[in-house]
Image: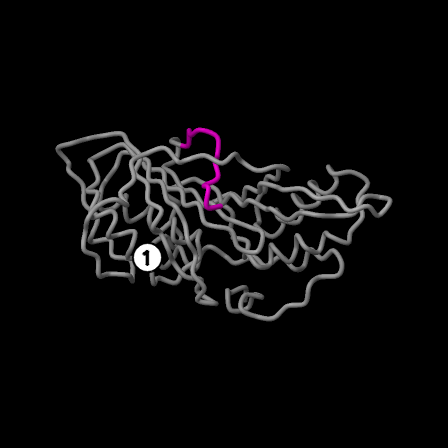
Amino acid sequence: MNTPQDSSLGREVDYPQQYDAGLLFPIPRAGARAEIGLAGAALPFDGEDRWHAYEVGWLDARGKPCVETATLWVPGSSPNLIESKSLKLYLNSLNSARFNRAEAVRERIVTDLSACAGADVRVEFGLPRFAEAPGETVDHLDVDIDCYGPPCEAFLSADTDNVVSETLTSALLKSNCPVTGQPDWASVSIRYHGPRIDREGLLRYLVSYRDHAEFHEQCVERIFLEVMRRCTPTWLDVEARYTRRGGLDINPRRFTPGQGGQAAPIRDLRQ
């Protein structure tokens, strides 16, 4: 069984001395999706998990080290997510492998990650630019908060008499790894068209993830479904930009099918 507990998370693992695609660990998305009511159902969203890799290295044909950064896109429709520590170990295993050209490295990563995810993964060398996310922050609101988990969708509400198109942001999203308990920090953007979302309720809702244990990808899918259910927007686009760990950061994004138009991806300054 490919459960999180079966992965290398929370375990001491030797640094890989040679290239090994078998280090990649897929986790089926179906289990977590069943917990939020998506068992066997058509997905109500499109999206992707965008990884930023800051430590990619290999040897050229003459043994000289080469270094790069990379952006990886794993389709949200893929049957598996790629566990983060296994991805780090896999990329590290390339450090002692020889390649005649950089394109061969990129193609190898594409092949291996696609096999792990069960869908076509896109890989490009380089990273998105740093930029401040557009939108209105809710973090300045003067509110009392005493709920830090489990996520409480009852905090969410919207004014059906006031229909808007806008983006709301917060840098206060935090959840925990379900295996190690380590904190995961993120900035979140919620872009939508529909009844105006109550700002204080949204802030309380996002903070209620603070002690919640769930993978990044699953948190974003939960946010998408609960905002859609409680606030009934015509369309919705949720992206969380998590801070870096082990040379990687992840940026899951889920949006209403057909509403995926967006400016080029960015990195937060915290990343």
With 37 as the anchor, is 80 left or right in this view?
Answer: right
Judging by the rendered image, the residue that carries numbered circle 1 is: 209
**Vertical placement of residue 98 versus 151, above or below:** above
Q: Position of residue 244 (x, y in %)?
A: 51, 51
Instruction: Count all numbered tags in the image, as a single digit.
Output: 1
Q: Position of residue 137 (x, y in %)?
A: 29, 40
For the magenta stretch, what is the residue range? 260-271
Residue 263 sits inside the magenta stretch: yes
Q: Quadrant of residue 119?
A: top right
Nearest the eye: 243 or 218: 243
With 41 as the anchor, is 165 left or right in this view?
Answer: left
Q: Position of residue 247 (x, y in %)?
A: 58, 52
Nearest the eye: 141 or 260: 141
Q: Residue at x 85, y 44 (%)?
A: 61
Give the farthest residue toward the right. Answer: 62
**Amino acid at the residue labelled 1:** Tyr
- Which image quarter is the N terminus in? bottom right
Q: Main secondary structure of the magenta part?
A: loop
Q: Residue at x 53, y 55 (%)?
A: 245
Binning the other alpha carbons within 10 Å of mark 1 as few (below 14), some (14 to 19) or many (20 upward) gives: many
Give the farthest residue toward the bottom. Answer: 12
Colour scheme in use = one colour
With 79 as the anchor, is 116 left or right in this view?
Answer: right
Q: Position of residue 16 (x, y in %)?
A: 71, 61
Residue 165 sits inside the magenta stretch: no
**Vertical placement of residue 110 versus 154, above or below:** above
Provide the secondary structure element on which disc 1 rests: loop
Nearest the eye: 141 or 230: 141
Give the farthest residue toward the left. Answer: 161
Q: Residue at x 67, y 46 (%)?
A: 109
